[in-house]
Image (tube, helix red, strand yellow):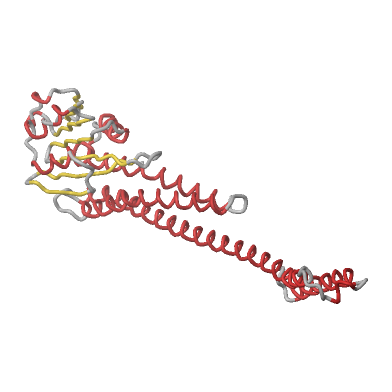
Amino acid sequence: MIRTMAITRSHEVVTGIPLEQLQPDDYAWMWVDFNAPTPKESALLTTYFHFHPLAVEDCLHVLQRPKLDYYDELQFFVLHALDPDTLHVEEVDLFLGQNLIVSFHSKELQEVDEAWTEIIQHAHDRKIWSRGPVSCAYNVMDKLVDKYFPSVFGIEDELAELENRGSSESVEDLMNQVFDLRGRLLKLRRTVVPMRDLMYRIVNSQHVQSNTEHKVYFGDIYDHLLKLTDMIEADREMTADLRDSYISLNSNRMNAIMKTLTVITTVFMPLTLIAGIYGMNFANMPELGWTYGYPAVLLLMFVLGGGMVMWFLKRGWFK
């Protein structure tokens, strides 16, 4: 689906204009949105708008890294939209010109719809009208970045719950949850960091902003991405600390178990030796014919076992 919006010089919004009727001289600026377009509609990027083949290729092929390219008087942006539930990334492409902005995304996105509605509702505002297509680019980028926050906040909440459940769940389950969180943080980092680098380039570019006001707006988005990056790095450090803590806890538990088993084995070693000696079938063993031989051996075994236990307790081996 292709939808169009045009802002007249009297600050009025006109939508639903067919592409062949869009005349740049008749309007202050225009926005054309390719919303989940068909192959025939996608071909208009080349046949109607005559965009650069490399930019069109980036739109139609695999997911690209966020970037900014310059083509004559046109800027081409590759942005990333993020699903807060699945962390699936969807590409959003923007072509920004002097009085035209074209957005392209293969799936319907709430962020673009919100930016579209906001432009329509505030088109009478002189600031939005005067900024032209840059206002659309800013709104789309701002909505995309705002959708990153719920994912990061959700992971932080899970980390807080994980710390509270540390004493009630097995180490194996806790470790699985920690590694799952680290994997999701890595996905977020792969999206947020390239977007941060892109926004830094936009803020310091002389091709996109024509005055200080534009730099302030894009700088605000850059600040949000910096905050997100710091939150993600802090969460990654926290998961690393939790991982190390659980590994240490698991090692301590294993050491305690091995120490207990070692003590038990050590206590029974001399008793097993005595039982082995008197279990041999030699004919000439004087103690076998002794009346008090059996209780004497049992007493010896009891004294040896009890004495070793007392000695281990004195040395603190059972602590």
> Left of 29 or right of it: where is 116?
right
Q: Quadrant of the C terminus?
A: bottom right
The total number of labels drawn is: 0
221 and 81: which is toward the camera: 81
> Left of 92 or right of it: where is 313?
right
Residue at image coords 21%, 51%: 202
Residue at image coords 67%, 64%: 261
**Spot occupied by residue 26 in the image (x, y as percentages of width and height):** 9, 28
**Spot occupied by residue 314 in the image (x, y as percentages of width and height):** 76, 75
Please determine whether, in this image, residue 308 is positioned above or below residue 70. Answer: below
> Left of 229 or right of it: where is 130?
left
> Left of 9 or right of it: where is 164?
right
Residue at image coords 15%, 40%: 95
65 and 75: which is toward the camera: 65
Image quadrant where residue 236 sits: bottom left
Q: Residue furthest right?
A: 291
